[in-house]
Amino acid sequence: MPLLDLSFEQLPGVTVIAITGEMDATNRGQLESYLEERGPDLREQVVFDLAGVPFMDSSGLHVLLACAAACDERGGAARLAAVQSLPARLLEITEVVAYVPVHPTVADAVAAASAVARNMTARAPD
């Protein structure tokens, strides 16, 4: 079973989760466990850095979509960033891009997520 390399960075209002490796059925459980144990506050903005993911099948996509749905339910949002060509094709075929924002770079995704987080903080009741 090929393992994924997973890491996260907590920024104000934004969690960046970097994934490296092929995302498929053999390591789906690893990603799910990681998100449950060390994952983001789903009320915040989450950016998945996919620059190190050369391949993703429907199993990997399912985990990302489940996280995005959980974020949405709790008032947060998920974004995908730096998607390579094969995973980008999967996102295009499945029309995920209509539901989850996809950004060309992690910096672009973090900037967009940070802007949303700042707006949410500014609107929060005292």
Image (cartoon, rainbow, N blue to C red):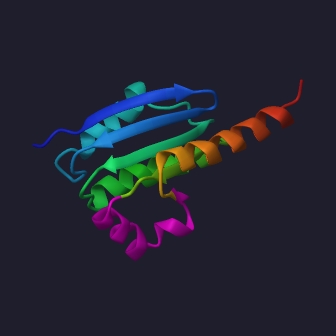
Is residue 117 one of those drawn in magenta? no
Which is more toward the observer, 72 or 19?
A: 19
Where residue 2 appears, x then y in whole percent? 12, 43
Quarter of image, res 54: bottom left
Is residue 98 one of those drawn in magenta? yes
Measured along the vertical axis of the image, is residue 80 above or below residue 9? below
Q: Can residue 124 be spotted in the picture?
A: yes
Instruction: Give the residue at the far bottom of this rendering.
Output: 93
Quarter of image, res 85: bottom left
Which is more toward the observer, 47 or 125?
A: 47
Where residue 66 appears, x then y in whole percent? 45, 50
Measured along the vertical axis of the image, is residue 70 above or below residue 94? above
Q: Which residue is located at x 48 percent, y 57 percent?
A: 104
Where residue 63 appears, x then y in whole percent? 37, 49
The region drawn magenta spans 84-102
Q: Which residue is located at x 23 percent, y 39 percent?
A: 4
Where residue 70 appears, x then y in whole percent? 54, 45
Q: Main structural element of the magenta stretch: helix, strand or loop?
A: helix
Q: Is residue 120 left or right of residue 73?
A: right
Q: Which residue is located at x 31 percent, y 53 percent?
A: 60
